[in-house]
């Protein structure tokens, strides 16, 4: 778990990513929880830099795919090409065969391509021409989507959004942070290119295995269940959290506790991860949505209503 | 704690000061007529019986003579009817009273009319007290023969005249007080006694002097000391009590289970809530509550040590509660130590 300190030291304290500590921690938490993250933010808020930096520091392979409407599933998964020299079909693996895949603007891809990607995410394997290939661990998809553009996009169906472990909403930096970026723009670009791993890939796998062993007391499990169930009772909610949402909270809470240097989960961990784990799974009633109620607000309401374990 | 001490002080004040003060106060009122009041209480009871004008009238007179309240000549004047005086004053009334004396049968209205006339003469001061009492007795006899009750106004006037006979000069200030006290302390119904308004409603203010007895001085000193202690050295007192409590806590037997650390945490929460005036909400985690306490400590001075203790108790609670740690007794002991320190710090 000391690796997160190194990551923080290099990326945050070193000024490579300015005011992105939360995003870095959440991405690493998703990695430890063997989940995928949907990063929502306007263009130019260091989504790609975040993913790339983490991949470099953790000695992981990183690929980026710019999703477009004409992108085919084979462009992601891979395909066989005929090699004229050998007279055989040769496998050309797609960008999905990596450790960290940044699927930029996932809602621009056609539903068919989205489905292919999401299937790979769920099964952690890819099927090409009937042949199944196991994806290398760790495997994390960081899909981004732009919340502003609504034309020429294919919004992800609820069932597919539900497969993302967390939704990380990122935004602009503060004025001070912005000035800092402007001051050190060339330095930051160079620093990202020159990042050296702080932990070998094999150690990352060990960390993932250890974080899964974090203990969760029964009352905390009860608390998680209560939080998820309470989302279903909120008046503004049309569809609340599913059992999968609860599992997502549990996994993220364990990873968060591990990153905090603990081998046990406390209610604070649940509260921290409840928003990223729930906000993309809750569907609001249209009348409330029109009034400006957000899923973040709903989760906040729920967290201020459900009592924490006592004593 | 503050409430308990306040209640204790109040109790001490109630027990120590008023009782001796009440006991001492009358003795220190100059010229208070104790002897007169005690003696005259019995006399007044006898007079009230006399004023009822019943069949034992003569017997009551004899008792008064025996007690030395009146002499035999006075008793004679109160027992016999002086017809000459009345015939000069009001011949008609005299003849009517003669009819009563001769036991003629009169109707109630006639008797009431006689009583009215008698009272009117008394009000105008045309009848001396002795004559009025004797004539009133005659009228009362008439009422009794008709099985009617003697009018209260007649009895009250008789009582007033009897008092005038026994205490002839009530105009002096001290005498007025005596009379008022006598009336208040006697069992005579108030309607029987109608003192002159001037006397009844303007008694002289008693001169209360400071009691000199040792008991009262001690009581006053005790209450004053406690009051001063509460006002000036409240914080110090709290510290002393807190120290005692803390010592008791730290010496208490430490349990072996992690539950002790957990219960210690909740005791700490209660203490912090009470002392800082905050409340841990149900949805608030232990770390959120700690942050709240730390936030308050930043705005108030002198809470650094308490926050440090509470922080450590919170950490111990977290480990004991959620981590399945095997260091139950160690954690409990440390939590208790910190709780004792917290009590000392917060008071």
Image (cartoon, grey):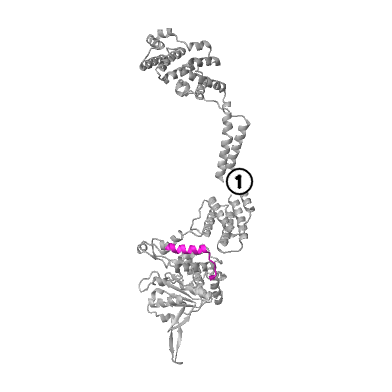
Question: Can you see residue B161?
Answer: yes
Does the magenta segment cover residue A227?
Answer: yes
Residue A190 image position (x, y, % from top left): 51, 75
Horizontal side of residue B8 vs A175, given as left or right:
right
Q: Which residue is denoted by mark 1 in the rendering?
A: B236
Q: Which residues are magenta?
A: A211-231
Horizontal side of residue A52 vs B220, given as left or right:
left
Residue B79 image position (x, y, % from top left): 48, 12
Decide which of A237, B309 is in the foreground and name it.
Answer: A237
Residue A296 image position (x, y, % from top left): 43, 63
Q: Is residue A142 above or below residue B120?
A: below
Does the magenta segment cover residue A140?
Answer: no
Which residue is painted at 50% across and 58% down in the image? B284
Q: Is residue B275 above or below residue B227?
A: below
Mark 1, secondary structure of its residue: helix
**Chain at tag 1:** B
Which residue is painted at 51% across and 62% down in the image? A219
Give the quadrant of residue B4: top right
Q: Main secondary structure of the magenta part?
A: helix
Q: Is residue B334 above or below residue A184?
A: above
């Amino acid at each position: 778990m000391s690796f997160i300190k190194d990551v923080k030291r290099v990326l945050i304290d070193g000024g490579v990513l300015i005011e992105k500590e939360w995003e870095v921690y959440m991405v690493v938490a998703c990695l430890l929880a063997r989940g995928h993250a949907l990063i929502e933010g306007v263009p130019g808020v260091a989504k790609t830099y975040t993913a790339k930096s983490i991949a470099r520091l953790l000695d992981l392979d990183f690929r980026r795919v710019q999703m477009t409407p004409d992108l085919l599933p084979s462009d992601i998964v891979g395909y066989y090409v005929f090699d004229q020299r050998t007279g055989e079909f040769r496998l050309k693996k797609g960008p999905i065969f990596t450790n960290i895949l940044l699927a930029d603007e996932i809602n621009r891809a056609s539903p068919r391509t989205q489905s292919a990607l999401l299937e790979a995410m769920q099964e952690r394997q890819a099927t090409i021409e009937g042949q199944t290939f196991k994806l290398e661990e760790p495997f994390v998809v960081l899909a981004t989507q732009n919340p502003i553009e609504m034309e020429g996009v294919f919004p992800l169906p609820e069932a597919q959004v539900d497969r993302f472990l967390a939704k990380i909403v990122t935004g602009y930096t503060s004025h001070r942070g912005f000035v800092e970026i402007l001051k050190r723009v060339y330095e930051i670009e160079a620093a990202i290119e020159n990042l050296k791993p702080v932990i070998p890939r094999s150690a990352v796998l060990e960390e993932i295995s250890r974080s899964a062993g974090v203990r969760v007391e029964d009352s905390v499990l009860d608390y998680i269940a209560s939080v998820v169930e309470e989302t279903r009772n909120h008046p503004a909610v049309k569809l609340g959290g599913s059992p999968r949402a609860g599992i997502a909270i549990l996994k993220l809470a364990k990873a968060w506790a591990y990153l905090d240097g603990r081998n046990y989960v406390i209610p604070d961990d649940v509260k921290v991860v409840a928003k990223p784990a729930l906000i993309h799974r809750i569907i609001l009633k249209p009348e409330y949505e029109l009034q400006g109620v957000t899923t973040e607000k709903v989760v906040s309401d729920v967290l201020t209503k459900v009592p924490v374990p006592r004593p | 704690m503050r409430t308990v001490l306040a209640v204790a002080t109040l109790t001490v004040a109630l027990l120590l000061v008023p009782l001796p003060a009440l006991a001492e106060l009358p003795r220190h009122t100059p010229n208070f007529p104790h002897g007169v009041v005690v003696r005259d209480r019995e006399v007044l009871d006898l007079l009230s019986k006399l004023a009822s004008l019943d069949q034992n009238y003569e017997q009551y007179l004899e008792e008064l003579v025996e007690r030395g309240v009146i002499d035999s000549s006075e008793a004679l004047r109160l027992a016999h009817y002086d017809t000459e005086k009345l015939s000069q004053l009001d011949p008609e009334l005299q003849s009517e009273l003669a009819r009563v004396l001769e036991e003629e049968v009169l109707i109630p209205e006639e008797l009431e009319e006689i009583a009215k006339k008698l009272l009117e003469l008394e009000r105008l001061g045309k009848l001396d007290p002795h004559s009025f009492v004797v004539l009133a007795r005659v009228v009362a006899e008439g009422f009794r023969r008709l099985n009617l009750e003697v009018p209260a106004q007649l009895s009250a006037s008789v009582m007033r005249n009897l008092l005038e006979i026994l205490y002839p000069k009530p105009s002096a200030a001290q005498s007025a007080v005596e009379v008022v006290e006598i009336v208040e302390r006697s069992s005579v119904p108030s309607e029987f006694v109608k003192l002159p308004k001037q006397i009844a409603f303007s008694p002289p203010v008693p001169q209360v002097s400071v009691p000199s007895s040792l008991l009262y001085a001690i009581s006053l000193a005790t209450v004053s000391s406690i009051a001063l202690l509460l006002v000036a050295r409240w914080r110090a007192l709290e510290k002393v009590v807190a120290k005692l409590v803390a010592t008791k806590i730290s010496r208490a037997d430490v349990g072996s289970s992690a539950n002790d650390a957990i219960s210690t945490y909740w005791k700490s929460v209660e203490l912090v809530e009470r002392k800082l005036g905050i409340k841990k909400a149900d949805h608030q985690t232990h770390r959120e509550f700690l942050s709240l306490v730390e936030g308050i400590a930043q705005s108030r001075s002198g809470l650094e040590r308490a926050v440090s203790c509470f922080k450590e108790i919170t950490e111990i609670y977290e480990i004991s509660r959620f981590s399945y740690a095997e260091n139950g007794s160690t954690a409990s002991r440390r939590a208790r130590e910190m709780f004792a320190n917290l009590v000392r710090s917060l008071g």
